[in-house]
C-alpha cells in the first residue's frame, strides 16, 4: 500500500531559522530507530538519501551503547537537531534506550520548538498511541521498571503517535523508494522555509497556540481580526510568532510586523507589501499612497498578517487594517497593551494573555538558570521564591533566570533581597512603556493606586481621586484598557505585583536618597524616618503608615508642617502628639484605623476631605469635643456630604454597640 500523509492539523510548532536559532542547531535531522528492526533496511536507505540531499544527519551508533540510559552526547545531539525523525517499528518499544530517546525528543518539541516527524514503519499509528499489540507486549517486559519512568514513556508514545507523519502500513509492495523521496522532499521544504524565532525555550506555548488557533478558525471563508491583549512581558509577541509558524503556509501571503510602535509608518507599509508580494518591489513615497497601494494590491489575496505591539489608531489606518482590505479567508492578528484600540477596530475576539502557571514558570526559570527542566540541588526553594516574585510573567522569568545562570546560592539570596527593594532595570523599563503613554492625571491615578489603593473598592477609590481633581472614572478606565490595573469579581482594584513595583520605583527614583522629597511614601521605614526627623517637604502628596497595633513610639504632628500638598493620609494604629493645625488643608482622604482619641479634634476636620475611615478607633463622640469645638468647625463637620460621613458614623456605632 502506498504511503499516506496523516492529518496536518496536528503538526508541531516550528522553530526559527533566524541567526540565533541556526547557531543552536548542530544537526538538521536526528533519527531515532530500533537498530535490530530497521538499521540495515529502511533506516539505512533513509539516512543515505538524506546525506545525498546535503542534509546533516545524526544517526546513533547502536554498538557503542552501554546501560539503560542515553548518554550525555546523545542528549546534546537531540537538543541540537532541528528535526527529529522517529522510525516506529514493531519492536521499537522493546528498547528502553529508544523510549528514553523518545521522551527527550518530545521534551525538545515542547521546550525548544523542535520539529518531530514520526514514520510508522509496518505498525499502525493507533498501536503507538494506545500501546496495543506489539507495543503492549513490549510494556509487559517493562513491568518491573519504575512506574514514573514507564508513565513518561507512555505519554511520549501518545504524544508522538498523534503527530503528522507517514503511515507505512505495508512496506512490501515496492514503494519504499518513492516514500523515502517524499520524506526527503518534506524535510528539505521544512529546512528551507524561514520560520520566526519564537523563544529559546517554548514552555507553555502549545496550549496558548491551540487556544488562539480555535479563535482564528483557519479554513473558514470569513475575514477575522483577533486581538492578543496583555501587559508588557506577558508573552504576547512570543505566542504570535508561534501562531505565525503554525499557520502561515495555509495562506497566499503572510507578514509579521514586529515592534510596530517603534517604526515609521511608511517603513511598515513597505515591509507589509514586500512580505506578501515578494519578489515584486513596490515603491511607497507617502503614508497616503501606501494605504492605496495596500488596498489595491492585497485586496484579492488570502493573507495572514500579524501586527505586533501596536499602540495607536494611526498605525492601524496606515496599514489599512480593516475587513474589506483583504480577501475572504484572511486573518489579522494584533498584539497590544491597549484594549481600546481593539474596541475601535471591532475585532472578532480578544485573547487575554494569562500569566504562567506556577509549574510552567518554574520550568521556564529552570531552563534559563540551570539549562534543565528542574532547579539544581540546593536551589529549589530559592527558585520557588523567585517564581513567586515573577508572578507568572515570562519576561521576568527569562531575564532573572539568565542573570542567575551559574550563580551561587548566596548570589540568589542577594538578588532576591535586592528585588524586594529595587526592581530589575530591564523588566522595569519594558513595563514602563505603558506608563509613559499616560497623561499627567492618569499617571497620578496610577501612582496613587500602586502605592496606596491596591485591593480597595473601585467606587470608593474613584470617589477619593475625583476629590483630588483627577477625573478618575475615565482615568481608571484607561488604566484598565491598557492592562495596568484590573478589577476583580468583588470590584476591588488589583495590579500585577511587578506593575506595582514599577509604579513604586518611579516614585522612589524621584529622590533615591531623601524620601522626604518624594511625592508618595508607603515604605514603613521611610515613613518613620521622615516623621521622626521632620524631614517631609511640600513634594509629599500621599503618606501611608500601617502599624500592627498602637506602639509606644509616637510622632509629633509638627512633622506634617511642611507637607502643604498632602492629599492622602493613612495612619493605622499610629499615635501623634501635638496640635492638628499642621495637617494640610488639601487633605482629601483620611484613613486612621485605631484612632487613639475619644473625639475628633477640630483641626482634623479639614474642609476638603471627601472620605474618612476611622474604624476600630477610641471615638466616643462623632462630633468634636464641645470644649474645643468652634461654631465654624461644627459647621464644617455638618456640611460634609452624608454619604461621605457615613463611614465615620457607622464606625462609631460599631465601636459603641459592638455591631
Image: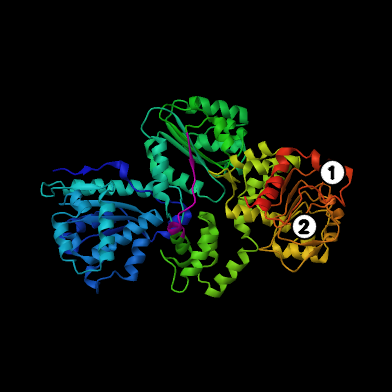
At x 44%, y 65%, the residue is: 371
Residue 144 tag number: none
Between discs 1 and 2, the one toward the N terminus: 2
Give how far apart the Cα atoms at labels 1 and 2 are.
18 Å
Give whichever of 402, 364 is nearer the camera.
364
How would you rate the neighbour count of disc 1 (Cα within 10 Å): few for under 14, some for 14-19, many for 20 or more? some
Query: Would you say 568 lies left or right of 255 here?
Result: right
Q: Where residue 404 sits: x, y (%)? A: 53, 67
Residue 353 visible from this viewpoint = yes
Q: Where residue 206 sits: x, y (%)? A: 39, 49
- Coloring scheme used: rainbow
Q: Which residue is mark 1?
A: 634
Looking at the rendered structure, the secondary structure element under dot 2 is loop
Q: Which residues are magenta?
A: 349-361
In the image, residue 359 lies in the stretch drawn in magenta: yes
Give whichever of 57, 590 is nearer the camera.
590
Query: Would you say 531 lies left or right of 139 here?
Result: right
Residue 597 tag number: 2
Amino acid at each position: 500500500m502506498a504511503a499516506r500523509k496523516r492529518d496536518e492539523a496536528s503538526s508541531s510548532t516550528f522553530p526559527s531559522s533566524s541567526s540565533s536559532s541556526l547557531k543552536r542547531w548542530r544537526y538538521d535531522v536526528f533519527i531515532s530507530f530500533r537498530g535490530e528492526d530497521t538499521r540495515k533496511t529502511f533506516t539505512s536507505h533513509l539516512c543515505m538519501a538524506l546525506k545525498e540531499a546535503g542534509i546533516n544527519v545524526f544517526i546513533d551508533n547502536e554498538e557503542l551503547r552501554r546501560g539503560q540510559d542515553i548518554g550525555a552526547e546523545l542528549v546534546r545531539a537531540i537538543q541540537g537537531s532541528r528535526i527529529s525523525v522517529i522510525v516506529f517499528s514493531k519492536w521499537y518499544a522493546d528498547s528502553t534506550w529508544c523510549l528514553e530517546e523518545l521522551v527527550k525528543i518530545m521534551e525538545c518539541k515542547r521546550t525548544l520548538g523542535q520539529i518531530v516527524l514520526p514514520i510508522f514503519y509496518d505498525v499502525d499509528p493507533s498501536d503507538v498511541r494506545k500501546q496495543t499489540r506489539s507495543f503492549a507486549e513490549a510494556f509487559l517486559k517493562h513491568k518491573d521498571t519504575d512506574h514514573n519512568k514507564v508513565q513518561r514513556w507512555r505519554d511520549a508514545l501518545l504524544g508522538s503517535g498523534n503527530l503528522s507523519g507517514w503511515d507505512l502500513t505495508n512496506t512490501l509492495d515496492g514503494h519504499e523508494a518513492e516514500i523515502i523521496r517524499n520524506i526527503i522532499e518534506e524535510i528539505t521544504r521544512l529546512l528551507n522555509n524561514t520560520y520566526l524565532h519564537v523563544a529559546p525555550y517554548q514552555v507553555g506555548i502549545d496550549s496558548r497556540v491551540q487556544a488562539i488557533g480555535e479563535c482564528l478558525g483557519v479554513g473558514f471563508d470569513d475575514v477575522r481580526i483577533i486581538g492578543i491583549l496583555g501587559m508588557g512581558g506577558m508573552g504576547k509577541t512570543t505566542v504570535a510568532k508561534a501562531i505565525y509558524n503554525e499557520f502561515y503556509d495555509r495562506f497566499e501571503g503572510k507578514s509579521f510586523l514586529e515592534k510596530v510602535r517603534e517604526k515609521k509608518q511608511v517603513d511598515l507599509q513597505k515591509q507589509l507589501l514586500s512580505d506578501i508580494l515578494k519578489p515584486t518591489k513596490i515603491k511607497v513615497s507617502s503614508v497616503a499612497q501606501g494605504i492605496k497601494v495596500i488596498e489595491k494590491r492585497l485586496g484579492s489575496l488570502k493573507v495572514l498578517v500579524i501586527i505586533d505591539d501596536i499602540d495607536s489608531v494611526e498605525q492601524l489606518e496606515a496599514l489599512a487594517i480593516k475587513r474589506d482590505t483583504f480577501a475572504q479567508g484572511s486573518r489579522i492578528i494584533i498584539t497590544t497593551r491597549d484594549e481600546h484600540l481593539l474596541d475601535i477596530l471591532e475585532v472578532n475576539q480578544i485573547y487575554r494573555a494569562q500569566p504562567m502557571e506556577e509549574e510552567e514558570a518554574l520550568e521556564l526559570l529552570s531552563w534559563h538558570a540551570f539549562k534543565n527542566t528542574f532547579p539544581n540541588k540546593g536551589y529549589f526553594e530559592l527558585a520557588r521564591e523567585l517564581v513567586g516574585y515573577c508572578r507568572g510573567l515570562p519576561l521576568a522569568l527569562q531575564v532573572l533566570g539568565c542573570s542567575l545562570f551559574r550563580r551561587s546560592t548566596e548570589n540568589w539570596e542577594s538578588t532576591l533581597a535586592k528585588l524586594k527593594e529595587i526592581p530589575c532595570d530591564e523588566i522595569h523599563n519594558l513595563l514602563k512603556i505603558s506608563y509613559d503613554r499616560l497623561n499627567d492625571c492618569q499617571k497620578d491615578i496610577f501612582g496613587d493606586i500602586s502605592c496606596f489603593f491596591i485591593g480597595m473598592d473601585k467606587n470608593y477609590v474613584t470617589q477619593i481621586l475625583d476629590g483630588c481633581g483627577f477625573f478618575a472614572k475615565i482615568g481608571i478606565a484607561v488604566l484598565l484598557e491598557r492592562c495596568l490595573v484590573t478589577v476583580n469579581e468583588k470590584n476591588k482594584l488589583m495590579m500585577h505585583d511587578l506593575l506595582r513595583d514599577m509604579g513604586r520605583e518611579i516614585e522612589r527614583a524621584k529622590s533615591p536618597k531623601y524620601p522626604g522629597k518624594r511625592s508618595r511614601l508607603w515604605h514603613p521605614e521611610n515613613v518613620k524616618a521622615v516623621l521622626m526627623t521632620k524631614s517631609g517637604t511640600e513634594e509629599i502628596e500621599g503618606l501611608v503608615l500601617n502599624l500592627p497595633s498602637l506602639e509606644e513610639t509616637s510622632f509629633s504632628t509638627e512633622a506634617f508642617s511642611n507637607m502643604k500638598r498632602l492629599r492622602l493620609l493613612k495612619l493605622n494604629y499610629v499615635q501623634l502628639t501635638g496640635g492638628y493645625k499642621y495637617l494640610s488643608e488639601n487633605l482629601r482622604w483620611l484613613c486612621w484605623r485605631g484612632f487613639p482619641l475619644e473625639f475628633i479634634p477640630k483641626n482634623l476636620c479639614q474642609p476638603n476631605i471627601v472620605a474618612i475611615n476611622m474604624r476600630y478607633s477610641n471615638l466616643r463622640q462623632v462630633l468634636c469635643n464641645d470644649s474645643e469645638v468652634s461654631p465654624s468647625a461644627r459647621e464644617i463637620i455638618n456640611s460634609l456630604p452624608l454619604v461621605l460621613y457615613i463611614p465615620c458614623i457607622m464606625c462609631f456605632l460599631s465601636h459603641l454597640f459592638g455591631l
